[in-house]
Amino acid sequence: MTLSDTEITMERLRNREVDVLARTLYGEARGESLSGKEAVACVILNRVKRALDRGGYWWGNSVESVCQKPWQFSCWNSNDPNRKKILDMEAGHRVFDTCVRIARRAISGCLKDATSGATHYHTLNVNPPWSRGRAASAEIGRHLFYNDIE
């Protein structure tokens, strides 16, 4: 059986989404537990879902556009020291391989969302202006998650 051009294109897009999501998880949550990494993946997928439900949104409507939107996931910022690390990362690194497995499960719809639909998060040691006066929908690892931020 051979794949059609459309199937090949879709597989390449899926592989690209998995790669970008895995690199984002590594850059943003490599020090977190499995559940912490999964929660960050859920935030990204929740942003994609919100954008698709609304016919588009400022942060993008695909995994790649959401992850790489400037100033949203700092590991992709050109001035962030994590950017080089995520771009240089290759298979065979234990933590990165875990991120790839999580990304595959997330893209295929196999992750349970422990964040209650969160689209934003921050570490416990910061208090960004957008979170002030808001109740977190979840605390997982060293992150607080929010599902009521526009």
Image (cartoon, helix red, strand yellow):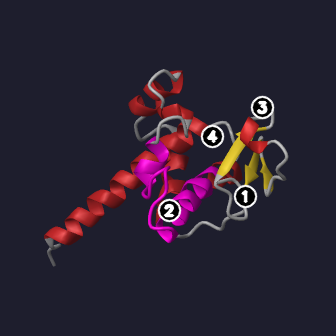
Spatial distance from mark 2 to mark 3, Cα to Cα?
Answer: 27 Å
For the residues labelled 2 and 3, say whether their Cβ atoms are less than 8 Å apart.
no
Query: Residue 109, image x and y in percent?
Result: 52, 70
Mark 2 highlights which residue?
51
> Callout 4 environment at 10 Å: few (<14), some (14 to 19), or many (20+)?
many
Q: What stretch is highlighted in magenta?
A: 40-68
**Dot 3 lies on which element?**
loop
Image-quadrant location for residue 14 = bottom left
Mark 1 highlights which residue?
148
- Sequence-earlier tag: 3 or 1: 3
Query: Residue 6, image x and y in percent?
Result: 19, 70
The residue that appears at 45% across and 67% down in the rendered structure is 55
Instruction: Answer left or right for 70 relative to 120.
Output: left
Mark 3 highlights which residue?
126
Q: Within the magenta stretch, is there residue 115?
A: no
Spatial distance from mark 3 to mark 1, Cα to Cα?
Answer: 18 Å
Spatial distance from mark 4 to mark 1, Cα to Cα?
Answer: 22 Å
Residue type at mark 3? Val
Residue type at mark 2? Ala
Given this view, does label 4 or label 1 mark the residue nearer the observer? 1
Position of residue 136 relative to residue 26, above or below, is below
Mark 4 highlights which residue?
29
Closer to us: 98 or 27: 27
Closer to us: 64 or 72: 72
In the rendered image, is residue 21 in sight? yes
- Sequence-earlier tag: 2 or 3: 2
Given this view, does label 2 or label 3 mark the residue nearer the observer? 2
What label sits on residue 132 in the rendered view? Answer: none
Which part of the image, by quadrant, shows the C terminus? bottom right
